[in-house]
Image (spheres, helix red, strand yellow):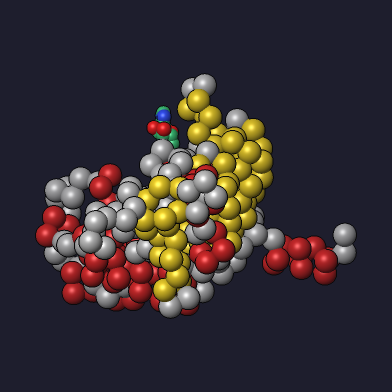
Amino acid sequence: MTEASSALRSTTAPLLALAGVTCAYGNTAVLTDVDLEIEEGQFTGIVGPSGSGKTTALRALLGAVQPVRGSVLRRPDVRIGYVPQVETVNWNFPVTVGECVLMARTTGRRLPWRSASERGEVRDILDRLGIADLTNRHIRELSGGQQQRVFIARAMLGRPDVLLMDEPTSGVDVSTRHEILHLLEDLHHDGLSIVLTTHDLNGLAAHLPHLVCLNNTVIGAGRPIDVLTVDVLERTYGARMEVLEHAGMPVVLDHPHHRPTASGQVVPIRRTGT
Ligand code: ADP
């Protein structure tokens, strides 16, 4: 291969990829033969029911879980930021927001105290994320949206090319969800690639440019309007749902009173007087 073609290859290679990946805990395969490519500049949501392997897929991309089959590919220079679920953390731990972010930098440290440049870096990141005024606040005092921003700030300290986020809107209210979605859209607009998991189809997934429907294996991938279909959703969730279109976006209705007809069409049950 010539130098030019090898350079081209490295700039067009996906940032991260799973190729034929199977992951298991003990004898139970939780991902089977999964192919997934994360291109530079992509903003992807992985959706699927609880236990479908979404977190395991993120952890495989990160290198925290080793596949029993297949390969995980990472572009050699790629920097990955991981944002775990906020629920997994003890928010009573006695540190301030600034300290909590700085604690993310554990490698390559020689000095027990923080340099002015490190503190400046944290200040810039917190400023970028709109929480600079919270630097000296105890992490216990934060709202759900602010906690999520602190987690993103920790991941941003490593200057990542791609953020892997686990359920960033789990357990937050509607306005916080909007706030997080807008923040992620801004970061994506500034060049960050993002992969997140979510089970929130209408509140989050439908707003993303690209989705992967996962249930042990990849059921569908593409634009929300193309993958949030009755068929793909039924194969992903094992339940029949109704899909409407509103302002060009799919809206998924999880309606237990809808029954499939012989033709497979879903019709609402008629009630007396309606
Ligand atoms: P999701 O994120 O879609 O909820 P996970 O990837 O967390 O799915 O989990 C997939 C399956 O693997 C679940 O049945 C879960 O209980 C199981 N699992 C996850 N982590 C472990 C683990 N460390 N040890 C054993 N089983 C696990």
Q: Residue furthest top?
A: 27
- Rendered residue at 34%/53% (across/down): 269
- Rendered residue at 28%/44% (across/down): 88
Residue 40 appears in the figure? yes
Residue 31: percent from left, percent from top: 54, 37
Residue 233: percent from left, percent from top: 49, 51
Q: Residue furthest front?
A: 273
- Rendered residue at 37%/51% (across/down): 258
- Rendered residue at 23%/74% (across/down): 132
Q: 252 and 269: which one is in front?
A: 269
**Figure quarter occupied by ligand 1:** top left
Q: 17 and 111: which one is in front?
A: 17
In the rendered structure, the answer to whether residue 96 lies left or right of residue 246 reads left
The answer to whether 236 is drawn above or below residue 207 in the figure is: above
Q: 47 and 250: which one is in front?
A: 250
Residue 61: percent from left, percent from top: 54, 48
Pick the quarter of the image with the C terminus.
Answer: bottom left
The quarter of the picture where residue 182 lies is bottom left
Residue 32: percent from left, percent from top: 59, 36
The quarter of the picture where residue 242 lies is bottom left
